[in-house]
Amino acid sequence: MRFDPETLTRLRRGIMKRGQTLATILSEILAGKDKDGSLDALGVGKPGLRPEERVRLALDAVEARRKLIDGDDDRYGRCDVCGEDLGLAALGEMPWADRCQRHMND
Ligand SMILES: [Zn+2]
């Protein structure tokens, strides 16, 4: 494993928190509230998608990262496209990150 247990705990907590934030926004959207501003601020999804689609895709991505980190999967913390290690500095900011800078918009 590339991360020590304390780092893993911290990263996992960040992923869970992101998931909770997104789940809360999803329930507010489903209750009819306009959360486009919140989604923009979180950098979630692509323009043109419906807000609930944006949140659902982001939730799926967060859940996929949680499974990797829980499974001690070496793909956690790497770019999904090229496998580059994203590095602890970037993961500390965004533990759910799944793309390097080059593939951010793929
Ligand atoms: Zn990449």
Image: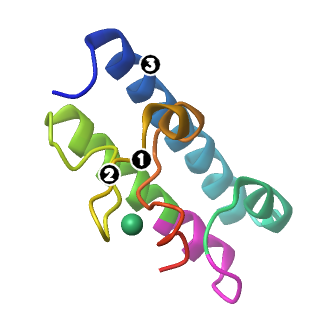
Q: Nearer the viewer, mark 1 or mark 3?
A: 1
Residue interval drawn in magenta: 46-57
Disc 3 marks which amino acid?
A: Arg
- If the image is split into quadrants, where does the N terminus sit? top left
Rendering quarter of residue 49: bottom right
Residue 71 lies left or right of residue 13; in this view the side is: left
User: Badge 3: how crowded within 10 Å, few (<14), some, or many (20+)?
Assistant: few
Residue 74 lies left or right of residue 58; in this view the side is: left
Disc 2 marks which amino acid?
A: Arg
Q: CA distance from mark 1 to mark 2?
A: 5 Å
Residue in the picture at 61% in, 57% down = 26
Residue 51 percent coordinates (x, y)? 68, 73
Q: Is mark 2 within 8 Å of ligand 1?
A: no
Q: CA distance from mark 1 to mark 3?
A: 16 Å
Instruction: Classify 93 as above or below 47.
Output: above
Q: Pointer 3: what residue?
A: 10
Q: Is mark 3 within 8 Å of ligand 1?
A: no
Q: In the rendered structure, does residue 104 fall within the stretch colored magenta? A: no
Rendering quarter of residue 34: bottom right
Per the rendering, the mark at residue 86 is 1
Asked if the residues shown at circle 1 and circle 2 are in contact, with their CB atoms under 8 angstroms apart, the answer is yes
Q: Pointer 2: what residue?
A: 78
Q: Secondary structure at mark 1?
A: loop
Residue in the picture at 51% in, 30% down = 14
